[in-house]
Amino acid sequence: MTASRALRGTGDVSPETLKKVRLAAQQIGYVGNPLAASLSGKRSGLIGVVVPSVSNIVFAEVLAGIADGLDGSGLQPVFGVTDYDETREAELIQSMLAWHPAALIVAGLDQPDATRNLLQRADIPIVQIMDTDGDPVDVCIGFSHRDAGREMAGALLARGARRMAYIGSSHALDTRARKRFAGFETRLNEAAQTFFDIQFVDGPSTATVGRGLTEQVLSDDPAIDAIYYSNDDLAIGGAYHCIAHGLSVGQDIHLAGFNGLEITKTLPVGLATTLTPRRQIGSKSVEMALAGLQKNAPLGPKRVTLQTQLLLPD
Amino acid sequence: MTASRALRGTGDVSPETLKKVRLAAQQIGYVGNPLAASLSGKRSGLIGVVVPSVSNIVFAEVLAGIADGLDGSGLQPVFGVTDYDETREAELIQSMLAWHPAALIVAGLDQPDATRNLLQRADIPIVQIMDTDGDPVDVCIGFSHRDAGREMAGALLARGARRMAYIGSSHALDTRARKRFAGFETRLNEAAQTFFDIQFVDGPSTATVGRGLTEQVLSDDPAIDAIYYSNDDLAIGGAYHCIAHGLSVGQDIHLAGFNGLEITKTLPVGLATTLTPRRQIGSKSVEMALAGLQKNAPLGPKRVTLQTQLLLPD
DNA sequence: TTGAAAGCGCTAACAT
DNA sequence: ATGTTAGCGCTTTCAA
């Protein structure tokens, strides 16, 4: 027992015994068993992370931020991938909760009621990430997709674009893309503008798909002077189409993506995009989870809204 | 006890009691505690995954493959990110092992001896991934980076390139990039050719960096007719440079990357690259781990070499 | 086919 | 400051 206290730095242990215990532990190569500690103690040493995808660089970077934030905390991240499937999400959350994690980090605010209840009943900090348009079960951190969409619409209007198209995720899948779309559309309406073409992508959001749809949109209506894509991958495809066909981006047509991927920075044509603080969301979400763990913590804000940054070509 | 057996489908339980147990479990909303099961039983329900990076799409896709392969196995993946730091890798592996995972998936074959010993002593399946040039602690799955580099050199030579440059990861960091470089160089030597310029990247492998270094390399030596990049991100930057400066790729100069990122497929200039089966490596690594878990399994091959695919522009 | 006993390795609570 | 007791929720082993 004294050894347990000594190694954890809990309670009072004389400096002398502390030294002895540490030495002994070292000599026999003692390694604690967090499984047993988790089962016995109040807190478990695991933290659950549930994201819709990891092959998407955006969520991958969130994971990187989480790993980073967790460094030195003694907690291990357990991850699950929902593939944008609500059923799978519910199952995953359930099986994560069975491990009695110290906290849970989940992407999105718009889980079905049953899932929300599941989260609510778990008596641990729940940190919902990537979105702030809505009410969190517990706390959330991210940014407003609605505002991001609205802002981009404003920027394109300011550049003189009037005849716009949208190319992006099928709405059923990605609620955050839907919010951006809604924000964009709202702003257009305010300016008495509307979309002239909307192409929904049901498959993967790739440059190949973006290039193909861009070609289609522009052949359907050559007067289109701006295209808003639901993300940079699609937008890059659009840029490639323009390069290949000698279209002058920024002159003949404006292209706007979302996420601010590194690769858009040095693209030989100007692409508007919104830089999202995804890595920061990851690391901060961990901070919020850890803060929620403390007993008499001065509980922080329910909603942390980080800034996105509009990146416009010269 | 009978309930435990019934719910796990272990031992003999009369169909009648089985039904009763299941019903009761359903009614009271019983959810097992895998923490306790792991502590008690021989096997734990966790599987450790150690990768050098997740913000790199390549490893992100490996994680996706792992998540996929794990689906339905009842195991939860715990991940750790080393950031290409051997000390951190050792610490991470140690803390993962403390959880008594059912198996461990680790990127790379070239851990320092101390780390190898650590892995060896753990009496669980160790699956090393992404590389087959070397000896695994237990089993490994991936492909030969040496062969990939060699193959690309052959392809560039066949296209008439003679004066080549290399732009890529600092060797200290990435042993796999080093192996590709070595393979490439070997092939050049066989053809009595050598590199005329080598630029090592110490920072991140990004398109921005790739573009800048490409400019530098070509201004240092305008006669360079082929550049091998350690990965597609850098190579894409090179492609952007060529587009921006009206260089005819495939004519004036050949560009070769590595990984076969989706985004290279539709690039408006031809980029040679090597498509790597990273997602498959992820899912297969799980299969190998699970296979190693079975008692009297017909132990599979120590080394599974998957095929890469050389993608050359028309 | 079912049950009873013991213990996995720890920690919280209560002595001393 | 240190030790003792009990128990976290399961599974393995042995007995009925």
Image (cartoon, coloured by chain):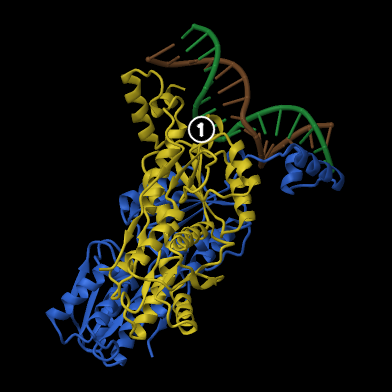
Chain colours: A yellow, B blue, C green, D brown
* Residue at image point 31% right, 49% down: B87
Q: Is residue A181 left or right of residue B34?
A: left
Q: Is residue B188 left or right of residue A220?
A: left
* Residue at image point 28% right, 70% down: A266
Q: Is residue A218 left or right of residue A269?
A: right
Q: Position of residue B171 (x, y in %)?
A: 25, 65
| Closer to us: A133 or B46 | A133
Give the answer, above or below, for where A77 lies relative to B267: above
Give the answer, above or below, for where A104 lies relative to A278: above
Q: Position of residue A159 (x, y in %)?
A: 32, 68
Please identify the residue farthest to the right as the structure is shown. Answer: B16
Instruction: Name the amino acid type tagged 1.
Output: Arg
Q: Is residue B258 left or right of residue B1?
A: left
User: What is the crowding at mark 1: few (fewer than 14 residues within 10 Å), some, or many (at least 20)?
Assistant: some
* Residue at image point 33% right, 72% down: B231
Q: Position of residue B129 (x, y in %)?
A: 44, 64
Residue carrying label 1: A43
Q: Is residue A25 among what the camera can see? A: yes
